[in-house]
Image: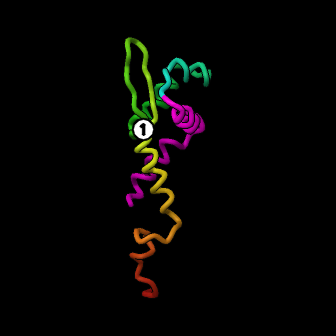
Amino acid sequence: MNYENISTLLKAIASPIRLEILNLLSCGELCACDLLAHFHITQPTLSHHMKALSANNLIHNRKEGNRHYYRLNTAAYQDLLAQLNLIGTSQTSCACHTLNKGDC
């Protein structure tokens, strides 16, 4: 388990707008214009949020003419959820199995 990677992804989604974007994209691909209308934010602000999600491979984007379309990277999102589910459980990959207990 790569805790640094998980932390980076959590930072990328640690925004109410980004979480809502992921939720909206879970229903399918959306145009940036649809997201702009939904959030009532400026295009540069939306671009900032989409760049953070895209840089962390949480979304895919494509351009068609002058429109940008976004969709959730379900594989990356499911992988993050799976890794988060392992934290706090006593799986064989749990960090507690690497501790030298009682050596203090």
Segment colored magenta: 1-28
- Residue 55: quadrant of the picture: top left
Q: Residue at x 43, y 35 (%)?
A: 59
In the structure shown, which secondary structural element does the residue marked by tag 1 occupy?
loop
Viewport quadrant of the C terminus: bottom left
Report the front residue among 61 and 7.
Answer: 61
Label 1 crowd (10 A; few <14 / some 14-19 / many >=20): some
Q: Position of residue 49 (x, y in %)?
A: 49, 31
Q: Residue at x 49, y 56 (%)?
A: 84
Give the main secondary structure, helix, strand or loop, of the magenta stretch.
helix
Report the front residue among 58 and 16.
Answer: 58
Report the front residue among 69 and 44.
Answer: 69
Outermost residue toward the top? 65
| Color encoding of the figure | rainbow
Residue 27 falls left or right of residue 104: right
Q: Position of residue 6 (x, y in %)?
A: 44, 53
- Whether 5 is among the magenta residues is yes
On screen, residue 32 above or below 17: above
Q: Residue at x 40, y 68 (%)?
A: 93
- Whether 85 is among the magenta residues is no
Task: Count all numbered tags in the image, as a single digit.
Answer: 1
Viewport quadrant of the N terminus: bottom left
Residue denoted by label 1: 73
Q: Position of residue 18 (x, y in %)?
A: 54, 36
Q: Position of residue 64 (x, y in %)?
A: 38, 16
Q: Residue at x 39, y 75 (%)?
A: 98
Q: Amino acid at mark 1?
A: Asn
- Residue 69: quadrant of the picture: top left
